[in-house]
Amino acid sequence: MLARVRNWFDPREVHETGQTPDYRFSLANERTFLAWIRTGLAMIGGGLVVAQFLPPMTVPHMTRILGVALILLGVGCALRAVDHWIRCEIAMRNNRPLPPSRFPAVLAIVVALGSLALLVEVFIDLYRAR
């Protein structure tokens, strides 16, 4: 694990393993990395907006909880992006199958749960407005 984290900052070791893959695959891997980074940045920005600019919700501290959750999810996306990029690059260079990832499913579940929490908040607010 520590060696992989070291590769995040110094990928020379990765480029010395196996054979150089077709550049199109390496560039596709990099585009996927950048897409995950954009997703992480969007979540961090969204978390800041939720935590700082939304009015207080019916459930106490809900805006702060959702804002912090989005920021942490964005951090997770960024860390996952670099780790997955390295693992895919190593797999391609060694002519092995690409590593599987559970992160997209986890991300989808967390986003769905956050959406449900907001939906509950909207219904509570509507019920109290009557």
Image: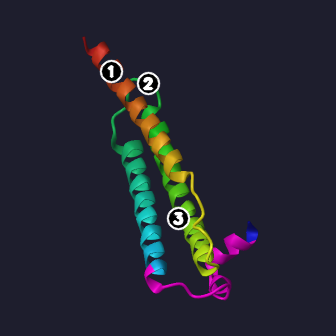
- Residue 64 seen by the camera: no
Residue depicted at x 40% and y 63%: 38
Q: Is residue 79 left or right of residue 53?
A: right
Nearer the observer, 61 or 66: 66
Q: Position of residue 82 (x, y in %)?
A: 56, 68
Confirm whether the magenta stretch covers residue 15: yes
- Image: 129 above or below 82: above
* Distance CA(mark 1)–CA(mark 3): 36 Å
Residue at disc 1, secondary structure: helix
The boundaries of the magenta stretch are: 3-24
Which residue position holds label 3?
81
The residue that mark 1 highlights is: 123
Residue 64: x %, y % from top left: 46, 39
Report the amino acid beneath label 3: Ala
In this rendering, is residue 124 above or below 109? Answer: above
Q: CA distance from mark 2 to mark 1?
A: 11 Å
User: Residue at the location (60% across, 73% down)?
Assistant: 86
Q: Is residue 106 visible?
A: yes
Tell me: residue 127, above or below residue 60. above
Where the C terminus falls, by quadrant? top left
Tell me the kind of residue under disc 2.
Val
Residue at 57%, 51% in the rendered image: 102
Q: How is the image coloured?
A: rainbow
Mark drawn on residue 59? 2
Can you name the residue that lies furthest to the right here? 2
Depth check, front residue: 67 or 100: 100
Q: Secondary structure at mark 2?
A: loop
At which x and y percent is residue 32?
A: 44, 68
Pinpoint residue 61: horizontal percent, then vertical percent.
47, 31
> Which of the two discs, 2 and 1, labels the residue nearer the N terminus?
2
